[in-house]
Amino acid sequence: MNTWVKILLFAIAPMCVGAQEAIRGIIYEKDSTNVMPYVYVINKTTGSGAMSNLEGKFYITAKLEDTIICSYVGYIKEYIPVKSLKKNAKGEYPIIMRTQYINLNSVTVTSFKYKQYERDYMNKIIDMSQIRTIDAFQSPFTAAYMQFSRRGKEIRKLAKIFDEILIEEEVAKKINPEIIRNITGDEKLDVEAFRKFCLELSNQYILTHDGYDLYSKVSDCYKRYKTEGR
């Protein structure tokens, strides 16, 4: 071999070590031929990423020593070393996503800070505030007192606060930050910002829905939340 060629190869060899590779992959569901669109694929080392298209395909660059992360709501987050990927007959790197079975029994529902006698008192105030709705002919003095007196106004104001407290407590029994993070698989999720974004996940919706309907609503909102780069 020509001496100059040897020198040139020797000079560029270090540049080839750790060079970026084009990773053209396709994502499937476990034990299925169904492809998965909208899966987030991120190079853990560089932070750069992509999303699989409607055919489940994605393109990302990475070094052999890098690890890529595949993430999708309701599925286990996969950490895959690039060097472990194997090409199929089409020259693509297939990746299988595994379903995450959400075991809400393992989620701790917080012990609420209000004791039973405190809740009883709040309910009593709420009941008192509603006296104004009674037919005035049945209880004219009480109805007028609750509607126009200073004390009546104070009770109504306090009842509104207590009503909101009790609603929040009931909501927390059904879904709380720990449950939301469990459903989304996002341990660092800002739940307060997420709830503000997901307007349809209102207290009223939470109180009137259960199980699949409630948890699928959380998942759908989270997909849009991440798609918009939140």
Image (tube, rainbow, N blue to C red):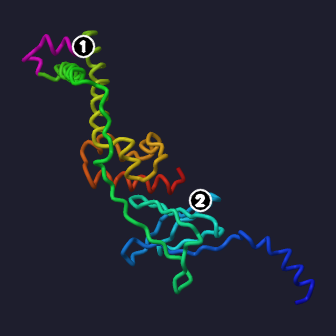
Q: Quadrant of the N terminus?
A: bottom right
Residue 34's quadrant in the figure?
A: bottom left
Left or right relative to 164: residue 45: right
Badge 2 element = loop
Is residue 212 shown above or below 38? Answer: above
x and y, in percent, of residue 36 in the image: 44, 70
Residue 96: x and y, percent? 44, 71
Residue closest to the eye, 195 or 11: 11
| Three-letter amino acid code at the position of disc 2 | Lys
Q: How many marks?
A: 2
Q: List the residue tagged with mark 1.
A: 152
Name the side, left or right, on which 64 lies relative to 17: left
Pinpoint residue 44: horizontal percent, then vertical percent.
59, 59
Q: CA distance from mark 2 to mark 1?
A: 61 Å
Q: Which residues are magenta?
A: 135-148
Element carrying mark 1: helix
Q: Which mark, by number, is residue 44? A: 2
* 147 part of magenta stretch: yes
Which residue does the image show at 52% across and 86% down from the upper left? Answer: 89
Q: Earlier in the sequence, mark 2 or mark 1?
A: 2
188 relative to 62 in the view: left or right = left
Looking at the rendering, which quadrant does residue 114 occupy?
A: top left
Is 30 magenta? The answer is no
Give the x, y percent position of residue 101: 33, 59
Question: Up-down: is 33 above or below 119?
Answer: below
Q: Residue at x 40, y 61 (%)?
A: 75
